[in-house]
Amino acid sequence: MTILTTKTQLLNPLIQLKTPLPLKFRPKMASISARLDNSQQQMNLSVLRFTLGIPGLDESYLPRWIGYGFGSLLILNHLLGSDSVSAAQLRTEALGLSLAAFSITLPYLGKFLKGAAPLDQTTLPEGAEQIFVMSENVSVAQKEALAWATYVLLRNTNTTSVLILTQGELCIRGYWNLPDGVSKDNVLDWFKSSIEETGLSDLTDTLYFPQTADAEFWNILPQGTRSVLVQPVLLSPNPSMNYMGNIEGFFLLTSSMRYAYNEKDRAWIRAVSNKLRR
Amino acid sequence: MLMVFSISSQSRADLLTLGLAVTNVLTGLVWLSIRPKSITPVGPQGVECQEIYSHLPESVVSEILWVWESLSAVTCCKSLVIVYDCQCIVQIGVAAKSLNIDEPFAVDAAKLMQGSLYQGVLKSGAQSYMANLSLYPGRSELPFLPSNTQAVILQPLGDRGIAVLGGDTIRGFTTSDQTWISYIGEKLDATLAKYMSSMPSVVQE
């Protein structure tokens, strides 16, 4: 029984993704680079929070309220100030008001930190549908391996769409934008021709684009893609390898979040790609 | 409170500005957050081994080797033992030394399956993660792992087996490692179940 349920789950085209995708409208945000360097990307930034201990109050906006409050007190102080206002006081107030303005914008800036509350950033790729297609001439064992690999990648990482090309066979799963006029039968052909255009089949190194611009450079990627990872499927090094090289194909993973794949995710994805070699 | 009004307006302005500066600094600290003390891995003491039950078909063996290769490359796992259908199928990595000989400690599958660790994991059906092995009394049920194993994950394989993973760092397995290990466990269970059911049952010595 166990085998049956696992199989039906693996072959079900509609999979529950790891990150739930709310369908709300996201305004376009200008990209501001955060000041943290790369080594701190994986840190859990919610370790220290302001807590007043009041349930239901979102303390991440506390700097904003403090900015408004102290700023208005500063202005009040200036207006009610006795007699002449010294130059020193004016300097202090200027500094205070600029600090207050900065405080007010802090929560807004916090949203751009790499890794800050990543779940809020996921969106459904517009106009995309969930598909699950596989090439026809694959062996049963290969079919199972492909189904399991795509299933695990979609469930365990922040991936919304995955494409695997190995030994000339394709497996595509997740949310993809299919252009109009591509019927169910032509899907595989359309993907094959698009892949040839990109030239990804000759890739030897892992490519990771944590922040793509909204205009995707490969027309194959679904809209709303923010991170792309391409992992070649490498054969194990073998001295008797022929001149064609040791690449068997590649994995293409896209996500609607920026910085979707950290070091550990990439290591696991490499491990999964090793499963499909041979 | 009334004292506030007796100080000059400049001092009040200074205090407010100071308060704002402190708020900004604290927010900066929150964003940076404090890095926890880094924990060094402890090299496991024992004997390297790679023993796989010989009657398994090639595809199952290659899958098991893939699992071991992934776990040792990505996580802090240094020892892997798989027990399925009351037999020890796999013992790879560093194992404890058997009493005075330089051989790996043989896994007593029957004893393991009757022990409280296995029974507990079987009943809950979920993975069990012992992040700091020295704190757990159940340690005595895993004599085949090196004595200085720091963390252990017990992954049930369906209801017929268990995978024991020994790590070399306290709290070395992250949450994402744990989810990956549970998915790999399900896959292994599916593979082993398919092949073990067609095997003649081996007589226990």
Image: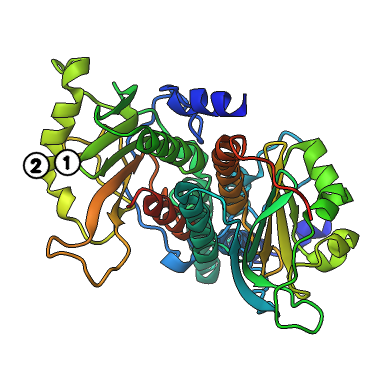
Q: Chain of mark 1?
A: A
Q: Decide which of tag 2 and tag 1 comes sooner along the chain.
A: 2
Q: Pointer 1: residues within 10 angstroms few (<14), some, or many (20+)?
A: few
Which residue corresponds to the image point at 50% horizontal and 27% vertical from the top-left?
A7
Residue picked out by circle 2: A197
Residue B133, compared with residue A122, is above or below; it is: below
Residue picked out by circle 1: A218
Instruction: Name the kind of residue labelled 2 in the image.
Output: Glu
Q: Pointer 2: residues within 10 angstroms few (<14), some, or many (20+)?
A: few
Q: How is the image coloured?
A: rainbow
Residue B28, compared with residue B41, is above or below; it is: above
Which residue corresponds to the image point at 30% horizontal and 32% vertical from the top-left?
A172
Q: Depth check: B90 or A90 in front?
A: B90
Numbered mark located on residue B118 in the image: none
Q: Chain of mark 2?
A: A
Query: Percent position (x, y) of residue A157?
Result: 47, 44
Which residue corresponds to the image point at 56% horizontal and 59% vertical from the top-left?
B31
Quadrant in the rendering for residue B164: bottom right
Query: Percent position (x, y) of residue A245?
Result: 17, 62
Gap in Å between the C-alphas at discs 2 and 1? 9 Å
Q: Depth check: B127 or B163 in front?
A: B163
Instruction: Name the kind of residue labelled 1 in the image.
Output: Trp
* Residue contact between numbered discs 2 and 1, judged by CB atoms under 8 Å: yes
Which residue corresponds to the image point at 49% horizontal and 67% vertical from the top-left?
A91
* Secondary structure under the numbered disc 1 in the rendered image: loop
Q: Are marks 2 and 1 on the same chain?
A: yes
Query: Percent position (x, y) of residue A1?
Result: 62, 24
State whether residue A50 appears in this view. Answer: no
Query: Percent position (x, y) of residue A116?
Result: 51, 49
* Secondary structure under the numbered disc 2 in the rendered image: helix
Question: In screen coordinates, is B14 left or right of A207?
Answer: right
